[in-house]
Image (cartoon, coloured by chain):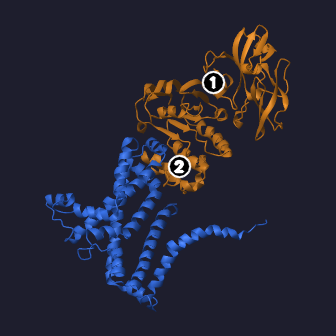
Chain colours: A blue, B orange
Amino acid sequence: MQRTHNNRAWWLVLPVVIVVAFSAIIPMMTVVNYSVQDIFDPSTRFFVGTEWYREILRDERLHDSLIRQFIYSFAVLAIEIPLGIAVALSMPRKGAMVSLCMILLALPLLIPWNVVGTIWQIIGREDIGLYGWALGQLGIDYNYASNPADAWVTVLVMDVWHWTSLVALLCYSGLRAIPDVYYQAARIDRASPWAVFRYIQLPKLKSVLLIGIMLRFMDSFMIYTEPFVLTGGGPGTTTTFLSQTLTQMAIGQFDLGRAAAFSLIYFLIILLVSWLFYTAMTHQDSDDA
Amino acid sequence: MSLSLEAVTRRVGRETHIDKVDLTFEPGSFNVLLGRTLSGKTSLMRLMAGLDVPSEGRILMNGEDVTGRPVRERNISMVYQQFINYPSLNVYDNIASPLKLARMASDEIRRRVHEISEMLHIEQFLKRQPSELSGGQQQRTAMARALVKDADLVLFDEPLVNLDYKLREELRHEMRSLFATRNTIAVYATTEPGEALALGGTTTLMHEGRVLQSGPTESVYHHPVSVEAARLYSEPQINLFEAEVRGRELSFSGAADAGSHGSRFVLPAPLAGLESGAYRFGIRPSHLGLAPLADDDLEFAVNVDIAEISGSETFLHVSNTDHSLVLHLSGIHDFDVDDSIRVYAPAHKLFVYAEEVAEGADSALIRSPTRADNIVPDTSSGGLV
C-alpha cells in the first residue's frame, strides 16, 4: 500500500514540544547542569562531576530528614486512606444530604496551605485554641511549640484534617460507580456486610484508591508550607521534612550545586516509590491467578 | 416447590409498577416473562425474589406465605443482564461463594463446582479472574454461581442481551437442558418473542405492569387473547387492520385524510361465520405472501418501502395509501424501492379481534387462525413461523 508522508504534520506536534520544553525539560536540565558544578557567582563556576551527589548521599542530616519524611508519609497514608474509605462508606447514597456532605468535605480542600498552617497555629494554642484548650482541659500537657511528639502529631493531624476529604471524595465517586445489581447479588448470596466490602466494594475501589494513594504519597512527601508555618520545622528538627531541608540548603545557604543534586535525588525517590505503589497495585490480579 | 403470586401489586410513590398480578409457577417449570422494556418484568422478579415487598397481595411458596420474608431468608438465585461476578475472586471461588456462605463442606463444594462448571463448559477457566474472561464466559460463570446452590427459584433478568448472536443461541440451547433435570422454578425475562418461543415452557405476557396472558408457550403464541398480546408476541410487529363486515362484504377502512375509501373484499369463506360489525384484523408478517395460496386470499396492491435482509430472511416493508404492512419472507429477496407488487393475506391466517372501543384500549380475541394446515413452529431455531 502506498503511504503518503506529509512532513508538515510535525508542525502539529510543535506546540506540545514547546510547552513541555519550557515547563519540564529546560528547568529540569538547568537543575542537572547546576548539580554537576560548583557555582560561586554567574561567571565563576567549576565542573565537579558527581561530587555533590556523593556528598548528599553521605549527609547524616539528610538521612534523618529522609527517614522522618518516610515515617510521616506512611503515617499519612495509613490514617487517611482507611479513614477516607470509612467516611465515603458512611455517606448517604442519595438525597439532599449528599450535597451537604460534599460541600463539608470539599471545604478543607479549598483552603490554601499557609492558611491551614495558621489555622492550626491558633487551634493548637492552649489559651484560645479549641484543640489545645480541650487537650489541656483533659489534663494532657500539650505544647506543639516545645514538645517534639506534640509537634509531630499536630502536623500529622493537620494533614489528616486537610486531605482526608480528597480520599473520601475519590472513594465516594468510586462507590457510586458500582451498579446496584452487585449489592442485590450479594444480598441474594446472603453475603455479610464485611464480605460486600471485601469482595465487591474494595476491588471496585482499587483504581480510585490507586490514584488516592499516589496523590497523597506525592503530596505528603513534598509537604512544606504547613509545618513551616506551624512549627518552622521545630522543635529542633522534629518536623523538618525533606523539602524544608532542601529550601534551607538552596536559599538559606545558597548552596545551589548541592541543592540541585539533592532535588534530583528527591525527585527520583518520589518517582521510584510511586512506581512501586503502582506496580504493586496493578499487578495484584495476575499474582492471584 | 411451587410459587404463586396472588393479586400482587407494587406502587412506588404514585406510580403503580405492578398491577394485581396473579401467577402460579409449577415445580420444575421453565417460565418466560415476555414484555417490552419497563413493562414490569424486573419489578415482578424483584418481588418474587423478596428484594422488594409488594404493596398489596401475597406471595406463596409451597403454599406458605413468604410475602414479607427478606431475600436473605429465601433460597433463590438471580442472573442479570450485566455480568455480575465478584471482581477479585477467580472463577472457582466465584462459583463456590454461595456454598461457602452456606458453610458447606469443602469436598462437597469442590464436587459441585466441578460438576456445574463442566455443564457450563467453563471447567478450563476455573483459575482465571473474571476480567480475563470473554463476556460469554463471564455470564456462564454468573449462571454457574446461580445454579450451583440448588435454589428453589432461579431468576434470569435478560441474561443474554449483552452477548453476541452466536453465544446467545448456544447458551439459550443449553439453558433448557440445564433445567430439564432440576426441580427448581426458572423464570426468564426477555423482550424478544423469538427467545420466548425458543425457550418454550410457559410464557407470560407483561404489559404496563399487568399480565396480559399466561400459559403454555405454544398456546399463547397461537392464541394471543388481545391485540396488545398479539403485538407483543410478534416480531416484527403484527399487521393490523380496522375492518368492517357487512353481510357478505368485508372492508378495511383507509386513511380518511387521504380521501381514501379503503379496500373492499368479498367476505372470504373461512370468515363466513362473522356477524356484521366492526372488528380489528391481524396477520403475522410471516403469513403474508407474494403469491396467492387460495382464491379467497385478500389481495393488496402496494409499493415497496424497504427490504431489510437479515441472515437468510427478508423483512419487506410495503405500503399503499391505506395500509402499511410488513412481510417476513424466508430467503433473500431483492426489491427496489417503489416497486409495485401485490401481497396476499390468506384468510384462514387472520386473527379477528373485537373493535377498538376507545383510543388505545385493548380488544379481545374472537377468532384465531385455523391450525389445520399450520406448519408446526420450529422452536429449536428460535424462528417465528
Q: Earlier in the sequence, mark 1 or mark 2?
A: 2
For label 2, the SS is helix
Between B210 and A224, the one lying in front of the other is A224
Between A239 and B293, the one lying in front of the other is A239
Point out which mark residue B113 bears. Answer: 2
Question: Residue at the spot x=70%, y=33% of the render?
Answer: B379
Number of numbered callouts drawn:
2
Quarter assignment of residue A60: bottom left
Query: Residue B369 appears at what percent x and percent y?
Result: 73, 20
For label 1, the SS is helix
Q: Nearer the viewer, mark 1 or mark 2?
A: 1
Q: Chain of mark 1?
A: B
Left or right of residue A221, residue B112 in this image: right
Query: Residue B376 appears at what percent x and percent y?
Result: 74, 28
Q: Chain of mark 2?
A: B
Is residue B375 at all visible to an observer of this figure? Answer: no
Q: Is the residue marked by circle 1 packed among few (<14), some (14-19), or many (20+) residues within 10 Å?
A: some
Residue tagged by mark 1?
B228
Q: Is residue B22 above or below residue A117?
A: above
For the C terminus of chain B, the quadrant is top right
Residue type, mark 1 in image:
Glu
Q: Is residue B308 above or below residue A176?
A: above
Between B119 and B136, the one lying in front of the other is B136
Query: Residue A276 appears at what percent x and percent y?
Result: 46, 69
Point out which mark residue A270 bears. Answer: none
Query: Residue A46 appears at what percent x and percent y?
Result: 45, 92
Question: Residue at the spot x=45%, y=34% of the render?
Answer: B50
Q: Is residue B285 above or below residue B90?
A: above
Q: Is the residue marked by circle 2 packed among few (<14), some (14-19), or many (20+) residues within 10 Å?
A: many
Question: Residue at the spot x=79%, y=21% of the render?
Answer: B346
Rounded to the nearest whole Å, what is the CA distance between mark 1 and mark 2?
44 Å
Residue type, mark 2 in image:
Val
